[in-house]
Image (cartoon, rainbow, N blue to C red):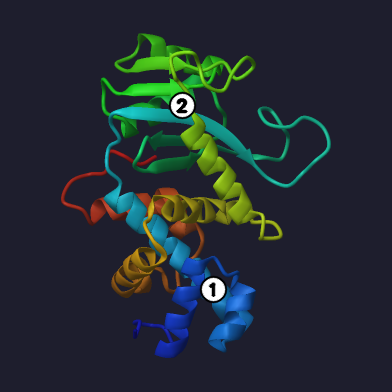
Amino acid sequence: MRLKYCKISEKSIDRLLEHFCAGTPALCASEFASVNRHTAQLFYHRLRQVIAYNLAKEAPLLEGEIEADESYFGGHRKGKRGRGAAGKVAVFGLLKRGDRVYTVMIPDAKGKTLLPIIRETVKPDSVIYTDSLRSTDRLDVSEFHHRRVNHSEEYVSNNGDHINGIENFWGQAKRHLRKYNGIPKEHFHLFLKECEWRFNGGSYQEKLKELRRWTKKDFSLFVGRDDKSTSFEAVKGEAASRCKAPLTASK
């Protein structure tokens, strides 16, 4: 596959795409594809930008049974863990059972932060399952049906309520990101969207086919652009401007 503004050979491009989909780190993939490690790292970075761009452009509104939860990413540190831990990146996630997950970095887990994201991403009258986080109290008097699970007592309530789906995603995402020896915070949103894409995608062959299609169409959009112009908010805005209708399912 030939890419505009890309000097890597077609054979090496195909190899890098295959290893990216397989979860091979860029350093190892560079040896398999016979390219410089810096070339492989930059190519992987461009692939994550393409993924974030297309997820923002194609994001549908979620409806039905939705699990909502926040999680914290970062290396192991002494002191408090989880909510309120210093130096961690806070992420909010919404998962439609049996379908897909949506994630976004958040400055905090307060109700005034989370509720607008839910309203922008989930259709009214959907059933939203959460843990006992106090900031979700506003859902009790919202246009959604709110059900809680008190994790200090149980992980599945007597009537079957749980948020095990979104917890499973957090586990998968953290296992995937653990292979990297630290991720710059300014690039974390791209790695997060990569994890979202991996979780939502189908088989290896289906993901590879989708990534090839996206890369051939959109790779040149990100060549020669700085990191500020490829933040998720910037990518989302550009994706919206290229669509006939504005995005309503991304934050």
| Residue nearest the viewer, comparing 21 with 37 | 21
Q: What residue is disc 1 on?
A: 42
Q: Is residue 159 above or below residue 231?
A: above
Where in the figure is residue 154, as x and y percent of width and height?
A: 59, 18
Using the rendered view, name the quadrant where residue 53 is placed. Answer: bottom left
Where in the figure is residue 202, as x and y percent of width and height?
A: 36, 57
Examine the rendering and report whether any part of residue 37 can be seen. yes
Q: What residue is disc 2 on?
A: 114
Where in the figure is residue 112, as x and y percent of width and height?
A: 47, 21
* Element type at mark 2: helix
Q: Residues within 10 Å of mark 2 (few under 14, many from 20)?
A: many
Q: Residues within 10 Å of mark 1 (few under 14, many from 20)?
A: few
Where in the figure is residue 21, as x and y percent of width and height?
A: 47, 67
Using the rendered view, name the quadrant where residue 178 is placed. Answer: bottom right
Identified at 56% across, 49% down, the residue is: 173
Mark 2 or 1, nearer chain start: 1
Q: Is residue 51 above or below residue 79?
A: below
Tag 2: residue type? Leu
Identified at 48% across, 13% down, the residue is: 158
Q: Is residue 61 above or below residue 131?
A: below
* Element type at mark 1: helix
Q: Is residue 53 above or below residue 210?
A: above
**Real-space Cα distance between discs 2 and 1?**
33 Å
| Residue nearest the viewer, comparing 61 with 171 | 171
Tell me whether the residue at label 2 lies in contact with that at label 1, contact meaning CB atoms closer than 8 angstroms: no
Examine the rendering and report whether any part of residue 92 can be seen. no
Tag 1: residue type? Leu
Q: How many marks?
A: 2
Q: Which of the labelled discs sits on residue 14, or is there none?
A: none
Identified at 82% across, 32% down, the residue is: 79
**Image quarter hosting the C terminus:** top left
